[in-house]
Image (cartoon, rainbow, N blue to C red):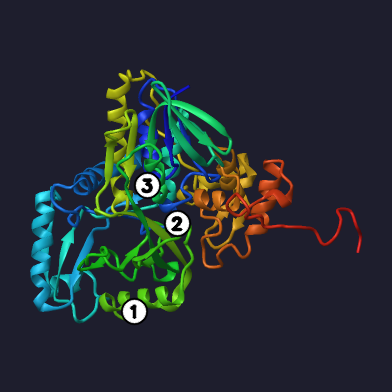
Amino acid sequence: MYDVCIIGGGVTGCAIARELSRYQVNACVIEKCEDVCCGTSKANSAIVHAGFDAAEGSLMAKMNVEGNRLMEQLSKDLDFPFRRNGSLVVCMNKEDLPGLQTLYERGVKNGVPELRILSREETLAMEPNLSDEVQGALYAPTGGIVCPFNLTIALAENANANGVEFRFDTEVTGIEKADGYYEIKTDKGTVETRCVVNAAGVYSDAIHNMVSENKIKITARRGDYCLLDRSVGDYVSHTVFPLPTKLGKGVLVSPTIHGNLIVGPTAIDIEDKEGTNTTKAGLDDLISKAGMTVKNLPIRQVITSFAGLRAHEDGHEFIIGEVADAEGFFDAAGIESPGLSSAPAIGIAVAGMLRDKLDLAEKEDFIATRKGILNPADLSIDERNELIRKQPAYGTIICRCESVTEGEILDAIHRPLGAKSLDGVKRRTRAGMGRCQAGFCSPRTMEILERELHMGMEEITKSGGASAIVTGRTKSQGQEG
């Protein structure tokens, strides 16, 4: 029997797992997909919000500001990219300028440091490519950008190194209360545990409602995005927001941590909790709205579009804590934006609740740091040549767009919780994320997966499940012709 089972391997579940692994505990993460970071965490704005938008006194505000504060040190400890590029909320009409003051005052009450309101001239001096209609902006220097894949994977790898088990391809079908513990029914059998953590993203209402009479409802809110080529990655240097509306923070334009430019998201409530398809109407709306804040947006440089789902709770608030009528069952539900920013703080909060509930002792041998995949581009020429001499795979480029080597892909496969699919490799190394969007490197990556994991080519998937790339052969192996 486990002490704790965490349902959901997104950034929230992995943050909780990492913080929980500080203690002497038998814990696991149950994830229905083949890898971590396969749901909401894989498709978002990759923004670390400063914390001025959430309502004063809310859990969103508290967790956002604290998560932002923690992110920089966490990035150093777990070796993932993060940068404070600062954010601007721009006002396009003079009559809306009081809205900037409202945001400023809310941010101050929330504890966001260094906020200030900029004049039109100051704003355009910071970002010359903003619309000529800009009247002013709220500037938050603590806003940042991060790689959501690297963040989630780093948390998961560190949790695993500290003893947390991960059960992938395992879908929860039911939860039953027993005598002092829970029986989690899955498509791979029953798991027994003293405590449950519900970090199931858009499905967190379904998991919660299995054990509680106090029902919650999570709506899948789809957000469409466009990703632009690195050639225009410096078109803006800050994260640029319009003044927010009741549906969210609006369509942002921002550099990414890897040098691209991202535009999005829309906010469209849908019934399908797997509905991550983009639509022409959604993308047209996205481009139109982004063009209102940034002039001459180089939208022709789009290399891909995608959509993600936010777990919107009806009250627009995080639900965190032990469920009143289900002792030992803890929610981390309704974690929509600023969920990515809040993850480090949510991890500490929920792990602390479990520590107190189970009277857990701290480990003396907790591993606080983790080293990410080596990027040869970060080395000097002499260091790179020495690396290639010792490990020739680092001299073979597999993904030309992102200059990803075979050595990096081998590392991604053989790490703790290593990649098992094309998307698993892509999330860890960026192989396939460049201008050609995996058009050239996929066959080479598949050959490496086939060789290293001793799989048949027909077994290799894009992202697990029924996403096989090769469904048959036109010729039998060994056949001539």
Q: Are marks 1 and 3 in contact (CB under 8 Å)?
A: no
Residue designated by label 3:
205
What secondary structure is found at the residue carrying circle 3? helix
Q: Is label 1 in a helix, a strand or a loop?
A: helix
Q: How far is mark 1 from mark 2, CA to CA?
A: 26 Å
Residue type pointed to by label 2: Lys
Q: Is residue 163 visible?
A: no
Mark 3 to mark 2: distance in Å? 11 Å
Q: Nearer the viewer, mark 1 or mark 3?
A: 3
Where residue 465 appears, as percent x and y from the top left, is 61, 50
Mark 3 closeness class: few <14, some 14–19, many ≥20 residues within 10 Å: many
256 versus 175 height, above or below = below
Q: Amino acid at mark 3?
A: Asp
Q: From this viewpoint, which residue is outermost toward the front?
A: 213
- Which residue lies at the image location 73% right of the left edge and 51% below the top edge? 457
Q: Quadrant of residue 232?
A: bottom left
Q: Amino acid at mark 1?
A: Ser
- Residue position for label 2: 273
- Tag 1 residue: 288
Residue 68: image x %, image y %?
25, 47
User: Is there any visible trace of residue 425 in the rendered image?
Assistant: yes
